[in-house]
Image (cartoon, rainbow, N blue to C red):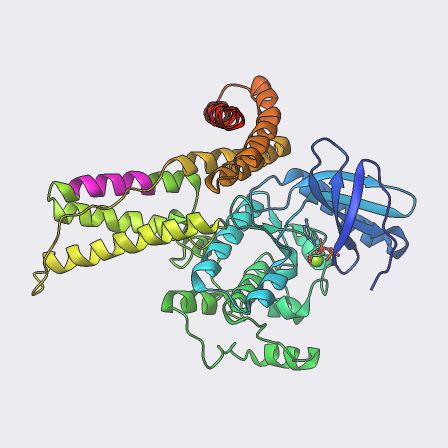
Amino acid sequence: MIIMPFPHLNGYEIAEKVGVGSFSVVYKAYTKTNPKEVVAIKCIDKRYQQKSFADNVVKEISLLKLLKHDYIVRLIDFQSDSKYIFIITEFCDEGDLSHYIRKKHKLAESLVKTFMQQLALALKFLRSHNICHMDLKPQNLLLRSKPKLQLKVADFGLSQIISPQNAEQSRFAGSLLYMAPEKLLNQHYDARVDLWSVGIIMFECLFGRNPFLNMNTKAIVDLMLKRGPIELPPNANITPVAEDLLFKLLKHNPDERINFEQFFEHPFLDLIHMATPENYHTAVSLIQEAIELDKSKQYSECLDKYKEAVRYLEAFIPLETNPNRKAMLALRLSEYTKRITALNDMLSGKENSKLVATDLQPLPLTDDQFDMLRGLSTLTPNMATGLDIGCTGELYMVEGKNSLALEKLTSALSLLIPILGNEPPGVRKDLLHAQVQKWLSLAESLKKVQSTSAS
Ligand code: ADP
Ligand code: MG
């Protein structure tokens, strides 16, 4: 392990150590700007470098610069001094996936699905740039909890731009426990090694442990040579569609393994219904239409709408990190599901099925717009911070802590109003404008409450 004192670098204040990688130490740090932003700083000691290693670092930096994507860790800055190289990226407050799995023991299938969807989109994006990662493992998948639970692919040190010469170079780089058999056995390999790693990661998420846990290198190599199937734990309780994907990813022979296109289309991923701001919008409209049709007794039409809406809505619950909103969405989901059962029973002429008129609530829209705005702000850190502060202000207001609420809203507005002034026309400007208006009027009413209670 590398031991190093806290480094000094311009413009940043180091807070604490958050991780140790194969060649680096990672710190949480703050920018010395006002307001300060939280970042992660990966420090690589130049003394440990060899030529190929320096190449890896340069590769990592140039790749990260190129790769701007929701599910890929964002590069903020890069510095170096006589001793160290520093890669400054967005900070992922939930740590890495390995740590997260250990904390939760294992993950619910619905959450595994969410993570696999996010990972799939990142891989799709990487493929569009002809890049394979080559070192996918839970330690290299970072998590952020805000605004929603998000997985971010990190550590591009070993990545390859896919080309035949490059493919030969990095043999035996990467971790054995996640390494595809063809690479481990020194055979010809290509981008499909990433799909094997995805399979092992999925296994580990579902069952809380690596399939090769406690096996030494020789035992793993022997198993690969025999092409021994990867066995599920005895108490494995997963759906057939999850099992189908898992086994297709964990095929020893890369020609038999699921390919990228099939992976992106696999029903377990169900990317069409993935939790995106647009899909939340779709769910909201579908529910509205369903409720209208239901009221006018067009039962079979409304049943289809409810069913489709529920497929969209289900995806939002696992990644919701605000407990109130999570409970609210889960409640709505269970109400709609009950309605679906009742409609099904009635339409199939089931005995004793009585259909009572519905008083179902639609899905709320405002948070959706907020989410969309928050999503659009990830590359503008001050705007994201302003939105988060405003959100905290609203929460204080709900809790009746009015002076704290006012304080937060005021500081959010002081960040957001100047940004709004410089924002080019477009959806983001419209949404930001609406948000600023809403918080301005909330702040006004809080001020009134304060002045009346003071007088
Ligand atoms: P290495 O190339 O040395 O493996 P990584 O980039 O994988 O380094 O980082 C090592 C560890 O540090 C990760 O597994 C993770 O726990 C932590 N870490 C890295 N980057 C961040 C980040 N942006 N936010 C939070 N933790 C991080
Ligand atoms: Mg790593």
Q: Nearer the viewer, residue 13 or 216?
A: 13
Q: Is residue 284 magenta?
A: yes
* Magenta extent: 283-293
Q: Is residue 356 visible?
A: yes
Q: Residue at x 51, y 48 (%)?
A: 121
In the picture, measured across the screen, residue 279 lies left or right of residue 435, that is: left
Estimate the x, y position of residue 193 in percent, counting from the top left: 59, 61
The quadrant in which residue 4 appears is bottom right
Residue 392 in percent (x, y) is at 54, 39
- Tell me if 7 is positioned left or right of 362 in this view: right
In this view, 122 is above or below 348 = above
Given residues 9 and 454, the one toward you in this image is 454
Front in this rendered view, residue 91 or 397: 397
Up-down relation of residue 217 to residue 445 (above or below): below
Q: Is residue 241 left or right of residue 164?
A: left
Q: Which of the two residues, 212 or 455, is positioned nearer the viewer here? A: 455
Q: Horizontal and vertical percent for residue 67?
A: 62, 41
Residue appearing at x 46%, y 70% in the figure: 247
* Number of marks present in the image shown: 0
Above or below, 30 against 444 in this view is below
The N terminus sits in image quarter:
bottom right
User: Is-magenta flag for residue 140?
Assistant: no
Looking at the rendering, the quadrant in which ligand 2 lies is bottom right
Residue 224, image x, y percentages: 60, 76
At horizontal 63% and vertical 54% (from top left) the residue drawn is 133
The answer to whether residue 377 of the structure is visible from this angle is: no
* Prevailing SS of the magenta stretch: helix
Q: Residue at x 63, y 50 (%)?
A: 93
Give residue 80's quadrant in the image: top right
> What is the residue that sits farthest to the front in this orientation?
455
